[in-house]
Amino acid sequence: MSSMLVLAIVAAIGVVAFFIGRQRAVAQDNGSVKPHSRAHYHGWWAFLLAVLPALLLLAVWNIGSSVYLERHIHAALPERTADSAVASEALDVSLVKSLARGLRQLDANTQLPASFAELQPLLAAKGVALATDTQDYMIPIAVEANAVQDRLGLIGAVVTLVLSIAGAFYALRQVAPRARARNNVERLMLWGLLAASTIAILTTVGIVLSMLFQTIQFFDSVSPASFFFGTVWDPRFAAAGSGGSQGQFGLIPLLSGTLYIAFVALLVAVPVGLMSAVYMAEYASPKVRSVVKPALELLAGIPTIVYGIFAVVTLGPFLRDLSAVLTGGSPFIQGQSIFTAGLVMGVMLIPVVSSLSDDIITAVPRAMRDGSLGLGATRSETIKRVILPAALPGIVGAILLTASRAIGETMIVVLAAGVAANLTANPFEAMTTITVKIVNQLTGDLEFNSPQTLVAFALGITLFALTLVMNIVALYIVRKYREQYE
Amino acid sequence: MNIMTEQSLENAVGDKMNAKSNEVIKMRGDKVGVFYGEKQALFDVNLDVRLNQVTALIGPSGCGKSTFLRCLNRMNDTIDSARVTGKITLDQEDIYDKSIDVVELRARVGMVFQKPNPFPKSIYENVAYGPRIHGLAKRKADMDQIVESSLKKAAIWNEVKDRLHEPGTGLSGGQQQRLCIARAIAVSPEVILMDEPCSALDPIATARVEELIDELRQNYTIVIVTHSMQQAARVSQRTAMFHLGYLVEEGATDKMFTNPDDKRTQDYITGRFG
């Protein structure tokens, strides 16, 4: 029985339990005792007890049975010898698994041939493509594995359904005028919300850990000092397995490129975004605001690759030609440059700054504006001296949030600033960033345990630390000013 | 002054606190009407504000008294949908005239709001805000002088003189309101408008602010909106009663509280409605 079908039946049991529970609660309310919970709470409680434990069991069962299946296949495979046909044990198991999946596509009464060579056309006719190094001995194991899986699935389904019905009965027996169904439902809501917020935190921890192990592995072959303080980025790509010479993995050119481009972007985005927020919050009539604000926010919805294309196709050549005209010959702005990337990224970030700041400025109480205007201050004096200072903590937070985005941006940089890891102070030359190099190191046909690949994780964790520090600083600033202002 | 109306002359007779000779009209509303969008909030209000007197505006909630007050320094301009008709003069000059600079007007007609609204700055900076904007002090010593004298006039100097550079928002409600009054005084206005300045204060703080209002009358002309009949009786020389957007009656406070002409005024004052 498939998991989907089980899920549907469990849901149906839950719905039935809901209606019965509600009905029972309504029937029991004869007016003599004031019911503790309204009828639909009894219904929800029955629904939750019918569905939640069953789903939990089903999930655990499925995980457990796939682990069991893997062990089973493992045990059935012949002992490995030096001249085994397949490179590794893990590959062996996964070949059997995909073969088993393929066999399921065949009609139930198909006579299975004993050799893979005969089996392959049959599977191909069903649209199943398999790796050519699948061995003949795997076929019976795969058939056996399918049988085990079916058996496990059936047991799991039956147990799940029994648990679901038991849960529903248990809840329905509890229905009574003074039963505290409302409190039970509320408590489950609380746990549900708690679980939702925990997921984000646990994921972050998981991401950090997954990068950490690879990073430690990387630092086994490259010393941290030469990574963090190295000024040359030259990873020397080598084909898988060919050994190849060690490259140089200096972080400095990438880090400075990242910060430089982010800085140029913020130089564009912050003043323009802030001023547009001030206009929107303080000056614009509701009519203008209702047009301009969505239009501006539309900018935020454009995929960054499109900005990148604009930069590389239009803006980059334009700036190069412009600089050539200005100097009368050789262009001083390269086609791909920090300046171009920063400019385009800045434009991309304008709506982020302006939207966040607009909310913050609008949140400054009207009493502040009235107080200042009532003293004969002009609008711009009021904004400059009262509203912006009052909104400052929020605005600083918004800017740092924007900076995090600028640092994490990849596509615009690849296209507009290039992939050359230069170390330069000239904004009109090409430079590249950490994110670009992460992508660079992980794409292509490379050994996964070479420093050339592992360096991506070290870069990733550095980037993570960088944005983490920025967020901490942002929080600190916001808190400090808040204390001062309230 | 021949610009006084018959009505106000009549009332002035009963006002024993002021001789006729110093009954100068500082501000005058002539058929003032206010619209918020389509809705009319104020109808044909004719009201005089006399120099160095406290004029109290009373009436039930939503009667238009705050609206009228906000017309006097054009604070209604900050509300997009608001429209003012009729004529309001300050020293016989139409304040809604095109030639009038609203910034200058608000420097002459200051305002204290219902809820104390000190800026999120230090006490000193709160008071120095207005003078700084209008360039009233050339040197720091001048500014110190303005701040000190304003705080003294607002009767809060002794409480804050040792903590001038602490945030104004850290003061108690009553102190904050007096700070806001000091802030308004610092730009040397001629008229101070107060919109229920004591409604957010406890009785002790209210008493301090009322005392202060009485003192300020020597140098300034004050218009105050209040919900408290006792407050109107205690601090004002003249009282105007509003109801449903109309000015019901206006006259010397003594007379208004003892022998009002209009039944609605009597009912309101004695607490029969409102």
Image (cartoon, rainbow, N blue to C red):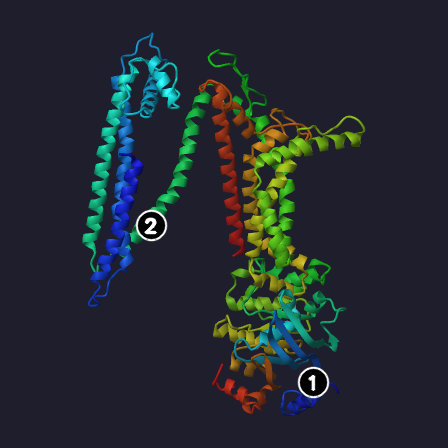
Residue A293, x across and y down, in percent: 60, 51
Judging from the image, what secondary structure is the residue with disc 1 in? loop
Q: Residue furthest top?
A: A83
Query: Number of numbered discs present?
Result: 2
For image coordinates 52% across by 23% down, the residue present is A441
Residue A484, x across and y down, in percent: 53, 54
Please name whichever residue, A316 or B132, is drawn nearer the observer in this view of the structure: A316
Residue A455, x across and y down, in percent: 49, 23
Residue occupied by mark 2: A190
- Where, by quadrant of the figure, is residue A485 drawn? bottom right
- Where, by quadrant of the figure, is residue B111 drawn? bottom right
| Residue A352, above or below A233 | below
Please name whichever residue, B1 or A412, is drawn nearer the observer in this view of the structure: A412
- Where, by quadrant of the figure, is residue B92 drawn? bottom right
User: Residue B23, which numbered label?
Assistant: 1
Say if mark 2 contacts mark 1, CB within 8 Å.
no
| Residue A336, above or below A364 | above
Q: Which quadrant, please, contains the N terminus of chain A? A: top left
